[in-house]
Image (cartoon, rainbow, N blue to C red):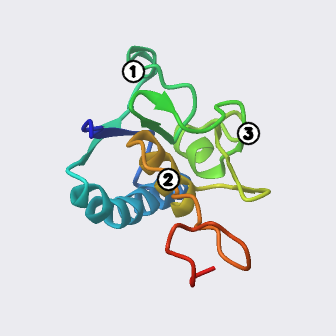
Amino acid sequence: MPRNDVHVEFLYLDLDTCTRCQDTSRALEEALRAVRPALAATGRQVTLTRTHVDSAQRAVEVGLEVSPTVRVDGADMADPELRSDCRECGERCGCPGDVSCRLWAYGDEEHTAAPVGLLVEAILGAAGATRPEPLAVGAGADCGCGPDCC
């Protein structure tokens, strides 16, 4: 089986006052705790790089469109166009109403922080993890167990 290690990047503007960045950071840590044992059991690993984007120039350099951003193997895992005004970031820069931070779509809802489930699914998906097909069971099913099973 080929080894599919996963690299996660977390790009953010402000972990001091922005609750969206703070909550996404916590959710990412929780997601990593959840997936690391599963990936390790298959000989894979996940690495994390955190990037504090502290200027417009730095945002251009790292390709940050909206904060916070989580990239899995280089791909933004959420729609960068889904965003809303962020009071904390607006107050920090002195431009209320002019700063938008990311929203995360998951489970028919929009969230101001990345949901742990969304992060886990993206990381496992990048590692090539898939859900196994369920066995066919019941009368007449051919599960391969023998004539007395199904």
Instruction: Name the residue tied to disc 3.
Output: 97
Compared across the picture, whether 45 is left or right of 150 comes to left
Front in this rendered view, residue 144 or 35: 144
- Is there any visible trace of residue 139 in the rendered image? yes
- Residue identifier under label 2: 119
SS label for mark 1:
helix
For the N terminus, give its image quadrant: top left
Where 50 sits versus 53, above or below?
below
The amino acid on which the numbered mark 1 sits, given as a three-letter code, is Val
Task: Inspect the image, locate mark 3, and give the three-letter code of the amino acid beneath it.
Answer: Gly
Image coords of residue 111 (percent x, y): 68, 57
Residue lying at 34% horizontally and 59% vertically, measured from the top left:
32
Dot 1 corresponds to which residue?
62
How far across and how far down the image is residue 58, in percent? Answer: 38, 20
Q: In the image, what residue occupies the spot 58% across and 51% down? A: 88
Instruction: Provide residue 74's location: percent of width, then percent of height.
Output: 41, 27
User: Is residue 11 shown to the viewer in this render?
Assistant: no
Work out how far the residue at label 3 is from the one at label 1, CA to CA, in angstroms: 24 Å
First along the sequence among labels 3 and 1: 1
Q: Secondary structure at mark 2?
A: helix
* Residue 77 or residue 121, whichever sits in front: 121
Q: Are marks 3 and 1 in contact (CB under 8 Å)?
A: no
- Identify the residue shown where x is 66% and y is 47%: 86
* Residue 97: percent from left, percent from top: 73, 39
Q: Residue furthest right?
A: 108
Q: CA distance from mark 2 to mark 1?
A: 21 Å
Q: The disc labelled 2 sits on which kind of residue?
A: Leu
Residue at mark 3 to residue at mark 2: CA–CA distance: 28 Å
Q: Secondary structure at mark 3?
A: loop
At x 68% / y 70%, what residue is drawn?
A: 141
